[in-house]
Amino acid sequence: MKCPLLTSLLSFALLVLLGVPGYAQLITQIPASVEEMVKTEFSAEKMELSNITYKGYSNAIGSFQVTGNESLGIQRGIVLSTGTVVYDSSDFGGYGPQGPNDFDAASFSNFADGDLDIALLAQDDSYDAAVLEFDFVPNSDILKFKFVFASEEYPEFVFSGWNDAFALFLSGPGYSGIYSNQAVNIAVLPNKDTVSIDNVNDSINSQYYVDNETIPGNLLRYDGYTVPIQTSAAVTPGEMYHLKIVISDIGDDSYDSAIFLEKIEEDYNVRIPNVITPNGDGTNDYFEIKNIKYLENNELIILNRWGQEVFRESDYQNKWNGDELKDGVYYYLLKSGDAIKYQGFLTLLRGAE
């Protein structure tokens, strides 16, 4: 019979005594303050957060860091679990997600409540939910999320009714969904499938699945996990949004799952349109360059087809509409300091006069 605690202690002793280089390790830590952890380990650098709340078992949320020669594709961030994220010595204690994968049934029922939104998404009862929520004000118009979903339900309980699931419920301007606060779930695969045991495994969406059982890894205790999955969301800078992160046991409260989330990335890339239609209808009337305010010491120059300058502005404010120029193709130069950073053609098209 395997003894997980003895195995882990022996592995650690060998690491210390022999100095094995590059030994893979997942380090997790329970936060003294969930609010401070979210701000430092998950929030984008310039993002304004408020009303941070966590609902679930106290040891089911924490920060993580990966060291050594194995990788999740995510080196650090926050982790939420349907069990515990650390070894738990309580009366109903259990093991966290840390490897090696030397135990046949990593399971820890933490008796947390379920969540109605993820129950609706999974179309089954929710148990042991870990729910992190907060309001935020973005600075860019695109948010990027990267995550890895892992579970001990793999592979035995795929399509067996125990369909543990993960969701990122986003609500705010521009969103109108079926979940609380009219939220939509943005935690989806590239083909828009939701993230759950039945939707990502060795037979469905298998290109996103990693078998951690056939050749047990040192990093995670769970039998399977996903490759890093990236999803994005369009938002309006300066507006208030709400994010609800949920991972939950589905169908019963046995066998743990966890979600590893990298720090949110705000996309500050400059995006330049190639056509404007300044006809006064309020749509596409101006040459609006996304994220122009993040291009330091910018200057915009517009030339006509003969190379003659028709417009120039430093610290461009996205208010050029072609003035009284005729329809046609123009050429823009966008500079940062003395360097030309972007250049290309721009079509001015008002339509029939």
Image: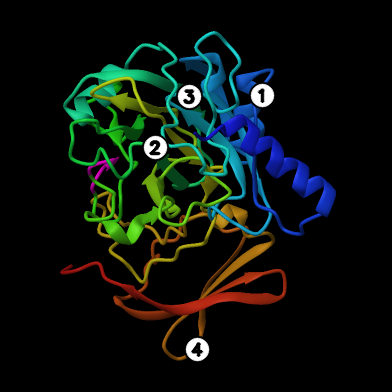
The residue pinned by badge 2 equals 152
- The residue nearer to you, when weighing 124 against 154, is 154
Residue 72 position within the rendered picture, expressed as x and y whole percent measured from the top left: 53, 52
| Residue type, mark 1 in image | Glu
* Mark sitting earlier along the chain (3/2): 3
Would residue 312 be visible to someone looking at this image?
yes
Dot 1 crowding, Cα within 10 Å, few <14, some 14–19, many 20+: few
* Mark sitting earlier along the chain (1/4): 1
Using the image, determine if residue 330 lies above or below residue 319.
Answer: below
- The residue nearer to you, when weighing 161 against 291, is 161
Is residue 197 part of the magenta span, yes or no? yes
The residue pinned by badge 1 equals 36
The residue pinned by badge 3 equals 135
Looking at the rendered image, the disc whose residue lies closer to the viewer, 3 or 2, is: 2
Give the CA distance from mark 3 to mark 4. 49 Å
* Mark sitting earlier along the chain (1/2): 1
Looking at the rendered image, the disc whose residue lies closer to the viewer, 1 or 4, is: 1
Give the CA distance from mark 3 to mark 2. 32 Å
55 left or right, relative to 188: right
Looking at the rendered image, the disc whose residue lies closer to the viewer, 3 or 1, is: 1
Magenta: main secondary structure: loop
Looking at the rendered image, the disc whose residue lies closer to the viewer, 3 or 4, is: 3
Is residue 231 part of the magenta span, yes or no? no
- The residue nearer to you, when weighing 257 against 171, is 257
Q: Which residues are magenta?
A: 193-198
Give the CA distance from mark 1 to mark 4. 54 Å
Badge 1 marks a residue whose secondary structure is: helix
Give the CA distance from mark 1 to mark 2. 30 Å
Badge 2 marks a residue whose secondary structure is: loop
Q: Residue furthest top?
A: 91
Badge 4 marks a residue whose secondary structure is: loop
Residue 115 position within the rendered picture, expressed as x and y whole percent measured from the top left: 31, 17
